[in-house]
Image: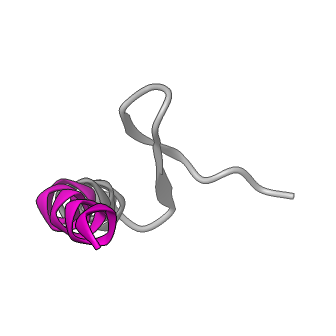
Amino acid sequence: MKTKVTAAVIALMLAPSAIWAMCSAGQHASSCVEGMVWDDAKAECVAKPTT
């Protein structure tokens, strides 16, 4: 029982960090103008590659 409670507490403590990270990545992607995409490696908007 203690293990389950401990695991639940740890998960609840980490949840805000995980949510913030996902939202942060989404903000960058949505801030790029049309025809541009977010490049995580360069941490900036770059021209959308064409196929």
Q: Is residue 20 above or below residue 1?
A: above
Judge from the rendering whether residue 6 lies leftward or rightward of residue 40; answer left or right: left
Q: Which of the two residues, 2 or 19, is positioned nearer the viewer here?
A: 2
Coloring basis for residues: one colour
Q: Is residue 23 above or below residue 21?
A: below
Judge from the rendering whether residue 13 lies leftward or rightward of residue 35; answer left or right: left
Q: Quadrant of residue 6?
A: bottom left
Q: Position of residue 34 (x, y in %)?
A: 42, 68
Q: Which residue is found at the position 15% from the left and 64% from the top?
A: 9
Q: Is residue 46 above or below residue 31?
A: above
Q: Which of the two residues, 25 or 11, is positioned nearer the viewer here?
A: 11
Q: How many marks?
A: 0
Mostly what secondary structure, the magenta segment? helix
Judge from the rendering whether residue 49 lies leftward or rightward of residue 16; answer left or right: right
Q: Quadrant of residue 27?
A: bottom left
Name of the residue lying farthest toward the front: 1
Q: Which residue is found at the position 30% from the left and 68% from the top?
A: 30
Name of the residue lying farthest toward the top: 42
Quarter of the image containing the C terminus?
bottom right
Quarter of the image containing the N terminus?
bottom left
Q: Position of residue 47 (x, y in %)?
A: 54, 46
Q: Quadrant of residue 42?
A: top left
Q: Is residue 49 magenta?
A: no
Q: Which of the two residues, 38 or 13, is positioned nearer the viewer here?
A: 13
Q: Is residue 41 above or below residue 7?
A: above
Q: Is residue 13 magenta?
A: yes
Q: Which residues are magenta?
A: 1-18
